[in-house]
Image (cartoon, rainbow, N blue to C red):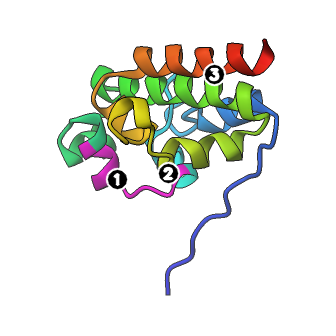
Amino acid sequence: MSTVAAVPVFEQNFDQFLHYLQDSETGTTSLSPKRYGQILRLDMQTLATQAHVHRNTISRAPDAESVQRYLRESVRVIRAAADVTGSVEKAIFWFKNNPLAPFDYKTPQELVSEGRAGALIRYIQSLQAGFAG
C-alpha cells in the first residue's frame, strides 16, 4: 500500500505556496517538479507531457530551462487566479478544471502547456478589472 504525502493548505498565502515549491532537495532557486506534481496531483509522466519534455527530464534534470519555464508560467497563472479568487486552492482547482469559453473550452492548464500563459494572464486581468470596476 502506497502512502500519499500530505499536501499543505495555503489558503490566501501565495508566498507559502511558492516557498513550498522551492526545490529544497537541490538547494537551488528552482521550482520542484516533484512538489508541483504533488500539489496539482499530477504524476511525473503527465507533468513531462505538459511541459513538452521527455519523462526522464523531470527526474534527471529538474533544473532544465524547459521544465522550469513550464513551472514558472503555471505558477504565474495560478498567482493571477489566486489574486482573483482569494485562495491558492481555489486557483489550483480553477487552473486544472475550468474549461474557458474564450479559449475553445480548454482549461488553463492546457493553455499553459500550449505556451499561452500570456493570453491567459490578460484574460484573468480582464476578469479582475470587470470584477473590481
Q: Amino acid at mark 1?
A: Met
Instruction: Tell me which residue sits at (30%, 23%) in the image.
Output: 115
> In this image, 13 relative to 39: left or right?
right
- List the residue tagged with mark 3: 127
**SS for tag 3?**
helix
- List the residue tagged with mark 2: 97
Q: Which mark is residue 72?
A: none
> In the rendered view, would you say 48 is above or below 19?
below
- List the residue tagged with mark 1: 44
| Residue situated furthest bottom in the rendering | 1
Residue 10 visible in the picture: yes
Q: Amino acid at mark 3?
A: Leu
Point out residue 61 in the picture as x, y percentages from the top left corner.
29, 34
Instruction: Tell me which residue sits at (52%, 41%) in the image.
Output: 95
**SS for tag 1?**
helix
Please tell me which residue lies in front, 104 or 16. 104
Point out residue 54 in the picture as x, y percentages from the top left corner.
17, 42
